[in-house]
Structures are given as C-alpha cells and as structure tokens.
Amino acid sequence: MQATIIRFPRHEDSNGVLYVYESGRHVPFDIRRIFTVSAMAGDIRGNHAHRQCSQLLVCTTGEIRVVCDDGFELTQHLLDGADCGLLIPPGIWAREDYLTDGAVLMVLCDRIYEEGDYIRDYDEFKTVAGS
C-alpha cells in the first residue's frame, strides 16, 4: 500500500478559513493520538516506519517534503497547507524534509504511542518490507 493524499473540506468566510478533520469522514480511521512537530529549514525528521500505526500528516504552516519508501519505490509529496494531508499506512518508511523555517507538521494517528511499533533501523525495514 502506498501513501496517498487526502483533501479536507475548506470553509471560508469574512472571519477566516476553517479546515475540518473528522474521524470516519475525512480521516479514514479513529484518531487515537495527535502531535505536532516544528523545525527549521533544512531539518530532517521522521526516518522510521511503523509496524501497525497509520498516520495522517498535515503541514499547517510552511512547506515540508515527505519522502516515502515502501521497500521497492520512493515517492515524494509536498505538503504546504492545511487543506490536504498525506495518509501513510503501516510499513512505509517516511522522512520529512523541512523546507521553510518554522514549518509545523500535525500528525494524526490511529494508535497511541508504542515504542515497539517503530522500525528505526533502515536495514531492518528493508528485511520486513521484503526487498
């Protein structure tokens, strides 16, 4: 399974813009955990895969390039607004390249934090992925 872009409803009026992220409607799983990561241009975050956890990455501020590896193919995705997110299923190695100072990534997860769910060694990932 590959990472896929999901678009979110945009509601705009004279007071500003609202984006909606609802479990079961716009987010294809029940949200169990949300966290944010901020970094400076040139910083790299991520560099791991998950055994069971699905994640939805939304760049709320700035620009972030996400490089995904399923063990056979690399894909790149530019996240630059709260109107879309990148759904990353389990078994995908992901790296986030922060392209602008102060970029903020919001991550919605279908599981609580479990250290054992992480694959942090790339060679182990390649073995698990069967490549």
Image: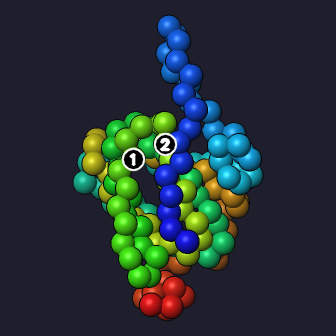
Q: Is residue 88 above or below residue 84?
A: below
x 50%, y 72%: residue = 92
x 56%, y 53%: residue = 56
Q: Is residue 53 left or right of residue 65?
A: right
Which amino acid type is marked by label 2? Cys
Of pointers 2 and 1, the one earlier in the residue sequence:
1
Q: Is residue 115 left or right of residue 29?
A: left
Q: Is residue 33 visible?
A: no
Q: Is residue 127 above or below residue 63?
A: below
Screen quadrant of the N terminus: bottom right
Q: Is residue 123 left or right of residue 114?
A: left
> Residue 15: x and y, percent?
52, 10
Please identify the quarter of the rendering in which residue 45 is found.
Answer: bottom left
Are the residues flagged by discs 2 and 1 in contact, CB closer than 8 Å? yes
Please identify the quarter of the rendering in which residue 96 is found.
Answer: bottom left
Q: Is residue 22 above or below residue 48?
A: above
Please identify the quarter of the rendering in which residue 113 is found.
Answer: bottom right
Residue marked by disc 2: 84
Which amino acid type is marked by label 1? Leu
List the single residue furthest toward the top: 14
Q: Is residue 56 visible?
A: yes
